[in-house]
Amino acid sequence: MAVVIPLGAVAYQSLRVPLSGHAVRLTLQQRGTGLYAAVWVDDAPVLAGALCQDRTWLVRHSAGVLPGDMAFADTQGTQDPDYTGLGSRYVLVYAERGNG
């Protein structure tokens, strides 16, 4: 089952969300070249400085800790996410592998 992670339309945000029994911390930062993400799972760094792109998995298989992954989806087209549309036009979805 896919879960939409709630986001606000702000240029820098950090949030904690429980996913698949793990405490996940996500930081998003808008820069001149795009929106970037950092991810921690159970307080262990998993990902830093990843460019967020439309319908592209963020963590991929590098973590091994999470049984799933996260991706942004543009609900109005195929543009890469920008902070101004977070939580509305651009949604962040978590799905366990094999259940996407």
Image (cartoon, helix red, strand yellow):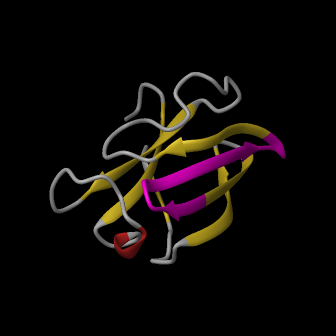
Q: Which residues are magenta?
A: 28-44
Does 17 lie within the magenta span? no
So how many labels did they put on this image? 0
Does 40 lie within the magenta span? yes
Judged left or right of residue 22, residue 89 is left
The quarter of the picture where the C terminus appears is: top left
Q: Looking at the picture, does residue 95 appear above or below residue 61? A: below
* Dominant secondary structure, magenta: strand
Picture quadrant of residue 71: top left
Judged left or right of residue 45, residue 92 is left
Q: Looking at the picture, does residue 85 appear above or below residue 76? A: below
Q: Residue at x 15, y 56 (%)?
A: 77
Residue 73 point in image, percent of width and height: 31, 52
Residue 11 point in image, percent of width and height: 52, 73
Picture quadrant of residue 56: top left
Q: Looking at the picture, does residue 91 appear above or below residue 73? A: below
Residue 60 point in image, percent of width and height: 52, 27
